[in-house]
Image (cartoon, helix red, strand yellow):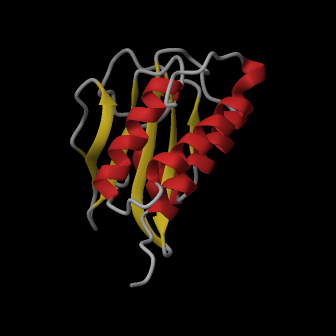
Amino acid sequence: MFEAATFSAESKPELYRQLAAQMKALLTDEYDLIANAANFSALVWQAVPDINWAGFYLFDGRELVLGPFQGKPACVRIALERGVCGAAASSRETQVVPDVHAFPGHIACDAASRSEIVVPLERNGALLGVWDVDSPTPGRFDDEDRAGMEALCQIFTESLNAPPR
């Protein structure tokens, strides 16, 4: 059920539709942030082509702290005023960066990364953290990726709302 999909520019919306369905099935009836973040990262890592890092930075009230991820070891702490992740967290707007080397203050955890997308995560109006995906290909992410990743992140944040007992 959870397999990598074949990919072409024309099939991005379909890829994200399939991922959304798989994500809902995977996260249904589980409300733990770490468990759901780990499975979210693994699913995206397996299904989305041409990426070299996918994971979470969680907000601890002061800074972003590394959470579950797939890829090479990463920076552990990111200040809200630093890099693409900090910009997404501070502005609460998705950042799509075609060339990370041109982004002021970019934090290079993996020198192979050339483009990045970061989606801020909010729950009940509060910053939860960010979802961060890197690619070794310049210009890898576009508006279809933005819409798809934002939809996946919505499923993730909704999964954390346990039903009332």
Q: Position of residue 75 (x, y in %)?
A: 24, 36
Whether 50 is drawn above or below 32: the answer is above
Q: Residue furthest bottom?
A: 165
Name the residue: 54% across, 19% down: 49
Name the residue: 33% across, 58% down: 33
Q: Position of residue 91 (x, y in %)?
A: 52, 58
Quadrant position of the C terminus in the picture: bottom left
Residue 57 in sight: yes
Name the residue: 57% across, 47% down: 152
Count of all numbered marks drawn on residues in the image: 0
Q: Nearer the viewer, residue 150 or 76?
A: 150
Whether 107 is drawn above or below 29: the answer is above
Residue 83 in sight: no
Q: Position of residue 43 (x, y in %)?
A: 45, 34
Q: Residue furthest right?
A: 10
Left or right: 120 as drawn, with respect to 129: right
Name the residue: 55% across, 40% down: 22
Left or right: 122 as drawn, with respect to 5: left
Q: Nearer the viewer, residue 116 or 28?
A: 28
Q: Position of residue 67 (x, y in %)?
A: 28, 46
